[in-house]
Amino acid sequence: MATNGPGGDRPDELAELRARLSAVEARTAAALPRRHRVRSAFAVLLVLLACVLTPLSIAAVWTRSQITDTDRYVATMAPLASDPAVQTAVADRVTAELVTYLPVDSLLAEVAPADRPLLNTLLGGIGRALTDGITGFVHDQVLRVVRSDAFATIWTDVNRDAHAAVEKMLTGQGGGAVEIRNDTVVLDLAPLIDRVKTRLVDNGLSIAARIPEVHTQYTLVQSDAIPKVRTGFRLLDLAGFWLPVLTVASAVGGVLLAGRRRRAVVTVALGIAGGALVLGIGLSVFRAVYLDRLAAGVDLAAAQAVYDTLVRYLRSAVRVVVALGLLVALGAWIGGRGRWAGTVRGLWASGFGAVRRAAQRAGLRLGPVGRFVHRWKTWLGWVAVAGAALAFVLWSYPTVLVTLCLALALVAVLAVLEFLDEPGGAPAGTG
């Protein structure tokens, strides 16, 4: 009768364990690819979402800045006061309005005898109609006011007072110095009319004192798409804070879920830059469409100036995001495992290493500083990156120049860290 001695069942147990282990490995091998594919799919979706939300986020931040920041809105509108096309258009509009209030037919009877020679001189005695002469005189006085520093002050004051009505403007409700009438955005030039009336009286046209208070409307924007744009602006204003947060969160989530995170950083950075570039192209396309659909009689040069001025900060934001995306992509690529990236890092390290060794031969002793930097260089580098990112976020309205300066400052800090990095203390022969 066979008996089971010590370890008699061990071959069977080992075979069973091997079978179980093989089964677990098979299940794990099958589960890991599925899990990896799911993570990769979510990573791709989040990256695409960040790219799609980028232009909306830029527009939302711009819209919110125009509504909540009075100084920003005034700074946006200020250049129009010195634009020749806008000055001429405003002068023409104000002149046409003022002339309708002047009793031209009774003008000669109303003018004092001492002022008649001046009037006759203005008329020139060349057969022009009285109305044309007065219109030319009024237009000349209006143009002088519009081209003076006083107009810039009036324009700033009007827009500063109007800023309180900007939100109403975007929601379609009237009121204030800026309002929407059907498909037209108009600006009330009553303060300019008052200044011109005073100048006309001071220059001999005393009958201008009879002109009542006039609220002349100057058209800023005219388009049948304004109702749709107004609705979009309102939505962007409501989402002005959360859209950028959602965009950043989507980008970060996509990177964290990606299998190759450094490559994902490059992809999302280039994607965000591309999304911003799409917005910039869209602004140019919309400009052409808007100008092509202007009503007959609208001053094209003035309309171009108004559009370009209104969106100039939006275009600046597009350029900033494009520049930032390219810089982040470049930084992530340099830190990758590619052959060219490794070559760049090698040249960087060897170059600063040669400078450091030359300085040490000249008497420089890094001592504990060199050893400290060598030990914590990676962490110190990330602190520098975080500092540059924080400075960019806290900057009120960063420009491309600010972005490049922060990038150069970061490179300078990393260069200093590389120079101070002394792996093993002072090299042999320098003691």
Image (cartoon, helix red, strand yellow):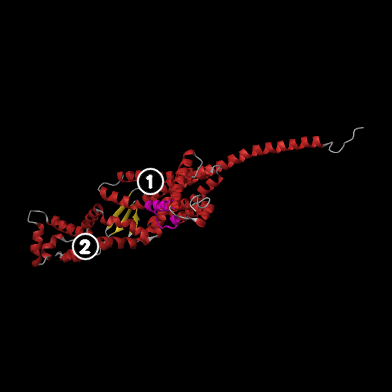
The amino acid on which the numbered mark 1 sits, given as a three-letter code, is Gly
Main SS, magenta region, reads helix
Circle 2 sits on which residue? 196
Work out whether residue 240 can be spotted: no
Viewer-side residue, 252 vs 197: 252
Question: How far from the left and from the top, in percent, is residue 209?
Answer: 19, 66
Residue 280 - label: 1
Dividing the picture into quarters, in which one does residue 193 lie? bottom left
Q: What secondary structure is marked by label 2? A: helix
Work out whether residue 257 can be spotted: yes
Residue at the limit of the structure toward the top, as seen here: 1
Residue 59 - label: none
Please state if 142 lies on the left or on the right of 40 as rendered.
left
Q: Residue at point 18% right, 57% down?
A: 139
Question: How far from the left and from the top, in percent, is residue 113?
Answer: 8, 67
Q: Is residue 401 magenta?
A: yes
Label 2 neighbourhood size at 10 Å, few (<14), some (14-19), many (20+)? many
In the rendered view, tell whether residue 201 sits above or below residue 374. below
Please state if 35 lies on the left or on the right of 79 as rendered.
right
Please state if 262 lies on the left or on the right of 137 as rendered.
right
Choose the circle earlier in sequence order: 2 or 1: 2
Q: What secondary structure is marked by label 1? A: helix
Viewer-side residue, 236 vs 20: 20
Question: How far from the left and from the top, in percent, is residue 60?
Answer: 43, 52
Instruction: Measure how far apart labels 2 and 1 are at the Cα level.
Output: 40 Å
Label 1 neighbourhood size at 10 Å, few (<14), some (14-19), many (20+)? many
Q: What is the magenta range? A: 391-411
Q: Is residue 224 magenta?
A: no
In the rendered view, tell whether residue 227 sits above or below residue 116. above
